[in-house]
Amino acid sequence: MKQRWTEEHYIHSDNCDFKRVCKLSTLLEWMQRAGDAHIAALGAPIDEMMQQHGMAWMLTTIDLELIRMPEYGETITLVTWNKGAKGVQWLRDFRVYNAKEETIGQARTVWILVDLNKRRILRASALPYVVEANEEDSVGDIPERVNIADDVELEHTYTLQVRQSSIDMNGHLNNARFADICLDALTPPELEQRLVRFRISYLQEAVLGDEIQIHRAQIPNGENENALNITDLTTECFITGQTVEGKRYFDAYVQLTAV
């Protein structure tokens, strides 16, 4: 069986943002597809899981670190592997390489197995397949859930209504779309900076017609112990999406640095 799954992706113009670099949401889409393809190659096809067993994988946490984002006209290699289950959490890591086989990004992700009919989390033992784990390689420890303390002063940025264009075949807002939602909460000067780290924890499903209140808070330099290579040129933000009543859909963290 394939312990590692490898894909190549060429960065086309429609994959890029206004800075001619790959969109964050595009990179996350490719990661999701690679994970799906790999788990199918390991003997657990996504369609069969959904149609015959009524279960699916759902992403709960991403911790993505970037040396740089892939650029227009570049070909990247995306490598992923399954690290097995810890309790109800399934762990999957990723690395992104440039044409010189240099690492330009890496990610740790956590997934859960969900009963699609009852909308509840399933134990790892409920998976009716044996999927091989690669325990010899690891980007790092299990990624921590994004935690926005209650005393953080969040300001409302904009309101989003979930429409059909963002809904996936699991019936909810696709995980990659949340990256666009988060970056839409940044200011024009912040968007000119280079993305260094993106962390997000998905807390509840967003479905068609839901109205999400997007809030953000900038973190003063030096107050976040998890920041990477903090300098005076670093910008850090918490971004969250919630209902009018305050129930959260997601919590995210974005770290940027001056180009």
Image (cartoon, rainbow, N blue to C red):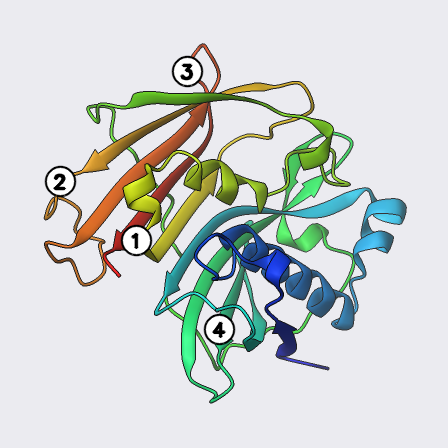
Lateral position of residue 99 relative to residue 117, left or right: left
Answer few, some or many: residues within 10 Å of disc 3's Cα (few below 14, many 20 plus, some between 14 and 19). few
Residue 167 makes an appearance in the image = yes
Residue wearing tag 1: 193
Answer few, some or many: residues within 10 Å of disc 2's Cα (few below 14, many 20 plus, some between 14 and 19). few
Q: Quadrant of residue 48?
A: bottom right
Residue wearing tag 4: 95
Query: Of the residues shown, which amino acid type is indicated by label 4?
Result: Arg
Query: Of the residues shown, which amino acid type is indicated by label 1?
Result: Gln
Q: CA distance from mark 1 to mark 3?
A: 30 Å
Give the mark, 4 or 1, whose residue is nearer the N terminus: 4
Residue wearing tag 3: 246
Q: Which residue is situated farthest in the right direction here?
A: 52
Q: Position of residue 102 (x, y in %)?
A: 42, 84
Q: Residue at x 76, y 72 (%)?
A: 41
Quadrant that contains the C terminus: bottom left
Query: Of the residues shown, which amino acid type is indicated by label 3?
Result: Gly
Residue wearing tag 2: 220
Q: Position of residue 122 (x, y in %)?
A: 65, 43
Nearer the observer, 126 or 92? 92
